[in-house]
Amino acid sequence: MVEQSLEFCNIVKSFPGVKALKGISFRAEGGRICALMGENGAGKSTLLKILSGDIQPDEGCLKINGEEHHFLSPHQSIKSSVSVIYQERQLVPSLSVMENIFLEDMPVGKLGFINMTELRSKTQEILDTFGLPIAPTDTVGWLSVAYQQMVEIMKAYRRDSNIIAFDEPTAPLTDKEITILFSLIKKLKEKGKVILYVSHRMAEIFQISDDIVVLKDGSLVKTLLTSQTNEGELVKAMVGRDIGDTYANLKRNDKIGDVLLEVNNLVTDYVDNVSFKLHKGEVLGFAGLIGAGRTEVMRAIFGADPIRSGEIRLEGKPVRFKSPSEAVASGIALCPEDRKEQGLVLKRSITDNVSIPVLSKVKKGLFLSRKTENDMAMNAVRKYSIKTPSADKQVMQLSGGNQQKVILGRWTSEKMATKILILDEPTKGIDVGTKAEVYQMVCDFAKQGIGVIFISSELTEVLNVCDNIIVMHNRHITGMLTREEATEELVLQLAMKD
Ligand SMILES: Nc1ncnc2c1ncn2[C@@H]1O[C@H](COP(=O)(O)OP(=O)(O)OP(=O)(O)O)[C@@H](O)[C@H]1O
Ligand SMILES: [Mg+2]
């Protein structure tokens, strides 16, 4: 077996207004997992896009097994045995699993027709290797995000790529799916592949990587051996300072008030018999596996999905919102999980995106001046340290984590007069330094008497940030715990209980 290696040689890349990569050089070896870490906007995804041929560097080159490469297209990258698995899915949703996996290489029969039997059996073989409970004929668009991602990995596996890069692969996955993913990545490692791995989750990095490359503002600041470093040192390299113990330093609200929201026996097409209470100043966590129905409960309350039966009371009065704008008008803000589909207008500026829900609240005759809008946007940029040269920049051009921060900025603007703030996976893709700021912001909202619902699949954050925790499984609530009672084991048990 040839020893595989991948080298980035002095890679420079500028976008209008930012130098995203300022001369990055490092070498990743086959049979090792190299983690790429750094704050939002540090340049991680840009580096992977250069590797995948989606964009070209201004200077520098790649060397694969010592041989120089300049990828002018994704096709050239794939042909050189590289697969990059992005945060954004690159599948064709209307096609089946098998068609997606073999998209570039359909088995063709004598008459030029695609050999469906062969396609199906070859796909089944791959699915079996990894023990995935999906069928070759399933339509990809109908699969959960987690399985869609697995299909992408299968695709890389099928191509037998020697270099495989993952950009925040676990963000949409549950613990169980992460275990499957990791065993899969380890299999690829054993086969001697070069693996690059981008993630903001510390625990994962220590679990899976051999080497760590830290980027900051487009420069390489440190390379570390995972076995010879620790979280503190790593965070310091990323952020440039000590941030201390995030959770211990949280200043929480200690005065929980009256009932603000009461949900009784809520039934929709997606959830069964859900009842709970949210109090003023309370941070109420919703834990559970992905697909447990947490997002769906919130969508129903928010007027985004129809309600079949049950009752919702806001400050004692029965309410039933027919649309999200009615909910917003009553002081409910929902910061959605999927920033692409539900959250952002990618082609518009940060300013426009931050002020959209406020605009919809403005009644006839009143309007926000451009200045107020700009101030709101600049506040968000400062509060969440959104990395951008100006608030006029298109959201599309921000890094993944910085897009998430724009959504947070939108729903947490002071102009919103929010009573209830629903945050669905708010820290997805956000770097460690900013995560601490998000947690403090959640507590600050609670201190103002706002009821906060905090949905998260990262157990540690739910356990440490929330006052009370509701656990859901399979469309209904399986338990409710106070912060004092809750442990990781208890929550997991409830998350799998029927
Ligand atoms: N197409 C683009 N146009 C303009 N600027 C861009 C574009 N793509 C990336 N950038 C900028 O390049 C910088 C690096 O972005 P990149 O996406 O590589 O960050 P990242 O390290 O992946 O961050 P995150 O952890 O948030 O995903 C950011 O300042 C970003 O705004
Ligand atoms: Mg990124």
Image (cartoon, grey):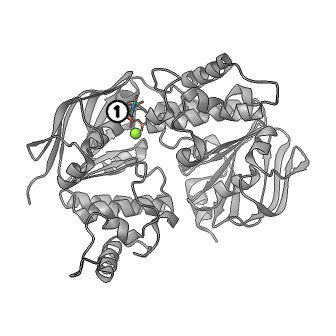
Instruction: Identify which residue, 435 or 395, lies in the foreground.
Output: 395
Quadrant placement of the N terminus: bottom left
Residue 493 picture quarter? bottom right
On screen, residue 236 versus residue 83, left or right, reads right
Q: Residue furthest top?
A: 371
The percent position of residue 45, horizontal first and vertical second, equals: 35, 39
Q: Residue furthest front?
A: 111
Q: Is residue 250 at least partly visible in the picture? A: no
Amino acid beneath label 1 = Gly
The percent position of residue 432, horizontal first and vertical second, equals: 47, 35
Residue 104 picture quarter? bottom left
Picture mark count:
1
Quadrant placement of the C terminus: bottom right
Residue at (55, 44) in percent of width and height:
339
Q: Which residue is mark 1?
A: 43
Crowd class of label 1 (few under 14; some 14 to 19; many from 20; radius 10 Å): many
Residue at (71, 31) in percent of width and height:
359
The secondary structure type at the circle numbered 1 is loop
The percent position of residue 476, horizontal first and vertical second, equals: 69, 65
Residue at (29, 39) in percent of width and height:
55
On screen, residue 349 versus residue 467, left or right, reads left
Q: Does the residue tagged 1 have its C-beta within 8 Å of any atom of ligand 1? A: yes
On screen, residue 210 versus residue 178, left or right, reads left
Residue at (31, 63) in percent of width and height:
155
Ligand 2 placement by image quarter: top left
Is 183 above or below relative to 418? Answer: below
Instruction: Identify which residue, 177 or 207, lies in the foreground.
Output: 177
Q: Is residue 176 at least partly visible in the picture? A: yes
